[in-house]
Amino acid sequence: MTYTSPAPPTSPPPNEPPIVSIRDLQKVFPVPGGETVALKDANLSIQRGEFISLIGPSGCGKTTLLRLMADLEQQTGGELLIAGRSADAARRERQYGYVFQAPALMEWRSVLKNVLLPLEVMNVPGDRVGRAREMLKLVGLDKFERNYPWQLSGGMQQRVSIARALAFDPPLLFMDEPFGALDEITREHLNLELLRLWRETGKTVIFVTHSIPEAVFLSTRVVVMTARPGRIEGVVDIDLPHPRSDDTREDPRFFTLATEIRELLKKGHA
Amino acid sequence: MTYTSPAPPTSPPPNEPPIVSIRDLQKVFPVPGGETVALKDANLSIQRGEFISLIGPSGCGKTTLLRLMADLEQQTGGELLIAGRSADAARRERQYGYVFQAPALMEWRSVLKNVLLPLEVMNVPGDRVGRAREMLKLVGLDKFERNYPWQLSGGMQQRVSIARALAFDPPLLFMDEPFGALDEITREHLNLELLRLWRETGKTVIFVTHSIPEAVFLSTRVVVMTARPGRIEGVVDIDLPHPRSDDTREDPRFFTLATEIRELLKKGHA
Amino acid sequence: MTTLRPSRAAGLGPMLIVALIAAALYWPLMLAANVGPAGRTLASGAELDCKTALACASQLRNPVVPAPAQLSQGFVRLSTPVTSPLALPYNVGVTAGETLLGLLLATVTGIGLALLLVASRAFERATLPWLVASQTVPVVAIAPMLAVLLGQYGVQGFLPKAIIAAYIAFFPVAVGMSRGLRSADSLHLDLMRTYHASPAQTYRWLRFPASLPHLFTALKVAVTSALVGSIVAEISTISFSGLGKMLAENSRASDTVALWVIMGYGAVLGVTLVALVNALERWVTPWSRR
Amino acid sequence: MTPVRTAAARPGAALLTAAALLIGVGGLLLVALTLPVPGDGTPPNARLWLAGILALLAVGAVGVRGAAQGESRAARTLPAAFTLLLAVLGTEALLRAYAVPAGLIPTPGRVLSALWTARTVLLQDTYTTFVLEALLGFVAGTVLGLGLALLVVRFRFLERGLLPYAALFSSIPIVALAPVIVKAVGLDWPSKTVVVAVTVLFPVVVGAVRGLQSASRLHLDLMHTYAATPAQTFRDVRVPGALPFVFGALKVASTLALISAIVAEFFGTNGHGLGFRIQIEVGRFGLDIVWAAIVLASVAGIAFFALVNALETRLLPRAGRS
Amino acid sequence: QKLVPVKVQLKWFPQAQFAGFFVAQAKGYYKAEGLDVQFLPTGDQSPIQTVATGTADFGTTWITDLLTARQQGIPVVHIAQLFQKSGYTLVALNSSGIKTPADFKGKRVGVWPSGNEYPAVALLKKYGLTTSLDSSVSNPSVQAVTYPFDPSIVFPDKVDLVSAMTYNEVDQIVGLGYPLDKLKIFNASDYGINLLEDLMFSTERTLANKNFKGSGQSGEDIAAKLVRATIKGWNYAVKNQKEAVQIVLVNCGNTCKGSGTRSSAASHQTWQMAEVAKLYNAGPTLKGRAGYLDPATYKANVTLLKSLGILKADPAPAAVTYKVWEKATGKK
Ligand SMILES: Nc1ncnc2c1ncn2[C@@H]1O[C@H](COP(=O)(O)OP(=O)(O)OP(=O)(O)O)[C@@H](O)[C@H]1O
Ligand SMILES: Nc1ncnc2c1ncn2[C@@H]1O[C@H](COP(=O)(O)OP(=O)(O)OP(=O)(O)O)[C@@H](O)[C@H]1O
Ligand SMILES: Cc1ncc(C[n+]2csc(CCO)c2C)c(N)n1
Ligand SMILES: [Mg+2]
Ligand SMILES: [Mg+2]
């Protein structure tokens, strides 16, 4: 795999607008006999090249926030800019890839063809099949390229969906609990691969996870959310050095940060 | 909540047959142009009152093993006995509850009605609605009883499905990554609740997880599996004292056991 | 859970057993159905080759339900010589041809309409009620008029029947296909949206494949509709051959037994056509397991 | 997710819509009135008028499109009404322009007046065909069909042994079936009711069986773990999942019922019913009454369809988001 | 030379009822006139519709059909009258005790729909009887039922009287096991209801066409040739009935066999040929004017139809032309 422009992580070019800028963002769902406030007064600014993790109790609005940024849902209040433009414009420019919480594979396509989908839709030039195979290899499923989704286990399906999102090499990645259904070994392997990709390509990643260690290990910043109404409880800067490795987890600072996030989470839960 | 018969964990009554006994169990799926060996030469014996975790790489056959025990799939080889009877007989006696990897809620039923389902089907006497509400409270969703499944986040749906499996108080519980989609705080809370339930009721739990700490924290034994063909790589006895609490995680033995499992897993991955 | 579902390759055994039971029940049922008319016919002084109502029940010239011997004679009479344009095999072929052409027309129209219905809310609102209405118009009543209208432009023979067949077959296709096009999973639609796929791309890569199961379900309904349509068309418009033509002729000639034999051929043709659609479905959608 | 465009939100568009509708409908009305009724006076130059009529129809279509914007009640119902109006006026104008004899195709105006002048007979016929034959037959066929579907799903043997024959029977056209049933049951309305019941039966069986078998695998697995009785699985999983399919089949059956009743009347009547009326009037070239009867059949069919539709929305407040 | 293609719509399935046409075709009479004639088989559509829209050039039908069509503005024109007498009957079993039309009161009568019910209605009206076919009557004295032509559907268990053409359905009823001596047959013509049947017609447009299908001949000329050859065919057929039946049998599909499954096509068509010969050999034909529409009979028909309320007024004179017949036969 060859990627160009290895951007320095966490140091955006000066004067560039933040890639994500959120002001007083709000999302209310109407439900029979009332409404659910899924997100309230969210404020956040993300610079190009950051790796942001969203963490928070189940039902606190993480998915909702991602969907708003991806222009899959319309906010009911506040302001949201992606790379200085509207979410809609960013989507039109194919700025981001999205890994859904559920695999969302197309049952009529084989594994390989599922990964090929974005390349075909976007008419990406070059050896598409080669590229798709490369991605499958990355997630350890190169041997399954001819299977259909229903012949895979839950975790395997989720990995295909990760390969699909990476296939067209978008500058921004939204990932909704991508590694939730994976075993720790596979997960750690993919963590490292993701970090390498991020480092080498200068992508911005916005990542939902339930694992505090994972959030600390991967991120430049961790956004901690609280439930009902969903709010941003706090943002923790992860000042661990890059590149990270298995050793990072041994760093005492790692432990401190994890505890800090843990406390924030507990506070949100109460 | 009142439960009778608090059985002493890990000490089955003498002469009782193992609640699960597996010999050379095998499951082969036919796939176009070949077959997938999902499970091979599995041998395992589980005593009443145990808490067994299954852990292993994605696609190694954990779900398959659970489905075989639950009589949802027919083995292609070997022998399988539940409480000395066939899996079919055990199922007919409503010996177990099953939490699927996906929530599998019925979209035409509200949250409360979903939890009520097994009580209605089994014609459980007494205050069913009260019981269902109690279970929803346990998983922190008592405020959502009138919502429909699609109005819940992924993790919330999974919690409803846990409440549903617990509702009819089965002696044996199969749980397929029940906490995978939950945040750490909720997860730890539910871990403790599950352990309490297990301790107080003498249930046998067979639990699939990807989290090594979770497996160690919860189990009496951890079964480590390897992928393709799915095999049992090893079984680790968790000799940590009961009842367990947050302090358990500080126990040096906890760390040793986790590392042991980790090594086994790594071995299986290679 | 494979054990809970019947496999496609279910044996022919049960069908055979049901057929045998039906065969065993046929004789008594036939007698029961015919004994009344036979008795009344005898009572009215008709000269038959039989004396008692029971004896006559199996040899009425125009039975309510024909006797097996009558059926088999009728079958041979109407099926031979096999290559004759007056015999059933050739006429079945003609009707099959009209039906398939009608189905093709119906499929093209139905899919076209479905695209319009799904693409334009204005179109749906303006026309859907009238599409439903078009199906409440009795074809038998308008088929002759339609054939006459087409006839003056030189459209005669095969084509008017196919068009009438298409008239009743397009509707299930349109409804099934629009349901299918709308059946795309919302997560998949979201996915295509994140790719900023054009509507055409969303159709090509998502809506079309997702609609195939619905389309085929509809086609199975449509193919029998088309068959009924072409038979009706043959009866009610100028036709030189076909099952409908034979039905009309034999009904004018009071040949009840022949009607049963032709109906039998029609039913077999219907099942064959449905099986054909099934085979096509399995070929087009290899991913579907069941 | 696209923002909803409403005519109200854009006054310019609303004005344009109104103007287009006015020109389309008013123009056609004017044309229809200017042209002589076929038979009165000299036939006009058809080709010239054709161009004008098509142009007016096109303008009207633009108006209909405009009227369909938004989610108001009017936007839902008016377009269909305007389409009908345009179609009726367009047909009237075309038939006049081409001076088509009333004995071949009557103008909508004549059909309307026939509807009025023959109203008592036609209403009586509608009662016979719609209520006695179609409705009763539909109910009987549906009840039987659902019962059969239950049996078929309950006993797998029947599914394999009987269901294939259902397909066999459903491909027997009514035109072949009706004479046999009329012969067996008689010429009065019950024979038509039986024909309707038989034709309704098969779509209902097939739809219900398909629906009952469409249950999600995971849900069936779940009930399996509860060792639920087949009856319970039925009630809690299969039936809720089957309802959409059953209603789909019922909608098809509702239009089928009416057509079958009419067609069956072609094979013998005691002088009542829309099918009888159509048949007898065709022979007299009273095509205005024929079309009036067809219109009534259509209206009854649509009403029937709408009834089933309303029942569906009532019984299935679908939880799904679109 | 090149033959002019001509399409003729028959009003029923091929059988001896159209023997003259088939004989003319087989003997080459049409070809001799320079015509290439194709017979279109019947369907549920009326011959009027096929001819009026130009799907066929000429057709056969019966008088009521033609005049009611004319009344509804369809410009069809009578050009030749083949059958000079009505073959319409109502048939009862002798055992029913029905002796005269007056006995029909309170009985069930089976009639054919689609305009074929008029002779029965006329007969009943003549005896002061009303039927349920007339929707303005509240207490009809005769219960009429309609059915699709095949008498075996209703006779004798569902109706007391059933419609039958002398040349077809009567023999079908015989085939059901009721020989003629068990039947009471009411011939409509015996009771003064002589609505004329098989006639030839075309449209004003076709007849006025100066260049019929590019043949250089007028529509009227073609019509005359067609009528001439057809009459020649008919004359031959009624004289050589055995041979005519053989020719007919070649033309029929499944329809010639008559009632039920037992009687042979040949014997049924032999009967039919004999019966249609009687209808052909009547009135003007006996005076050597075959194909001529007797103005007196025509007038009587019009009067009858007006009294029944079927015709509201006298038909336009253009409904009938004698020019074609005159051109064909050279007679006046
Ligand atoms: N379509 C909807 N209609 C109504 N309520 C909704 C809808 N979608 C989400 N919600 C509600 O919004 C809140 C936030 O949901 P969201 O899916 O964003 O949570 P989440 O943080 O992703 O949770 P999880 O970790 O469990 O996936 C929840 O309370 C949920 O019930
Ligand atoms: N119905 C099936 N047909 C064919 N292959 C199957 C089927 N179900 C499972 N498999 C295969 O069996 C193997 C084991 O699957 P299983 O679902 O048991 O894995 P798992 O351990 O639960 O994985 P995960 O942690 O990802 O859920 C996988 O390789 C999968 O592809
Ligand atoms: C064999 C035979 N049977 C019935 C008709 C129908 N038909 C034609 S004219 C007419 C009216 C009689 O006055 C009727 C009933 C037919 N043409 N040939
Ligand atoms: Mg979520
Ligand atoms: Mg699994």
Image: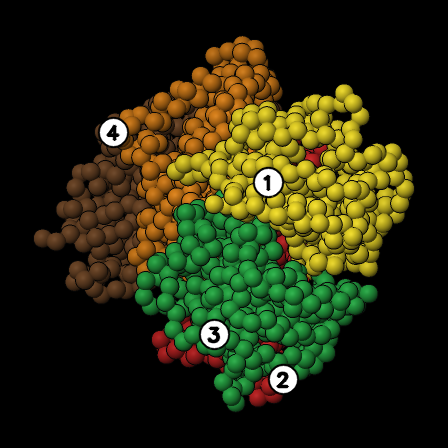
Chain colours: A green, B yellow, C orange, D red, E brown
Image point 82% across, 65% down: which residue? A270
Q: Are marks 4 and 2 in contact (CB under 8 Å)?
A: no
Depth-wise, is mark 3 or mark 4 nearer the camera? 3
| Mark pair 3, 4: CA separation | 95 Å
Q: Amino acid at mark 1?
A: Val
| Mark pair 3, 2: CA separation | 44 Å
Q: Amino acid at mark 4?
A: Gln
Q: Position of residue E198 (x, y in %)?
A: 37, 44
Depth-wise, is mark 4 or mark 1 nearer the camera? 1
The residue to which callout 4 is attached is E246
Where disc 2 sits, the SS reads loop
Tell me the tag on residue D9.
2
The residue to which callout 3 is attached is A202
| Mark pair 4, 1: CA separation | 93 Å
Chain letter for mark 2 = D
**Which is nearer the eye, B146 or B37?**
B37
Quadrant in the rendering for residue B68 = top right
| Mark pair 1, 3: CA separation | 38 Å
Binning the other alpha carbons within 10 Å of mark 2 as few (below 14), some (14 to 19) or many (20 upward) gives few
The residue to which callout 1 is attached is B224
Q: Position of residue E31 (x, y in %)?
A: 16, 46
| Mark pair 4, 2: CA separation | 80 Å
**Which is nearer the eye, B35 or E326?**
B35
In the displayed structure image, the side of residue C162 where residue A187 appears, left or right:
right
Depth-wise, is mark 1 or mark 2 nearer the camera? 1
Callouts 1 and 2 on one subunit: no
The reply to whether the residue tagged 2 has its Cβ within 8 angstroms of ligand 1 is no
Q: Are marks 3 and 2 in contact (CB under 8 Å)?
A: no
Callouts 3 and 2 on one subunit: no
| Mark pair 1, 2: CA separation | 64 Å
Image point 64% across, 50% down: which residue? B211
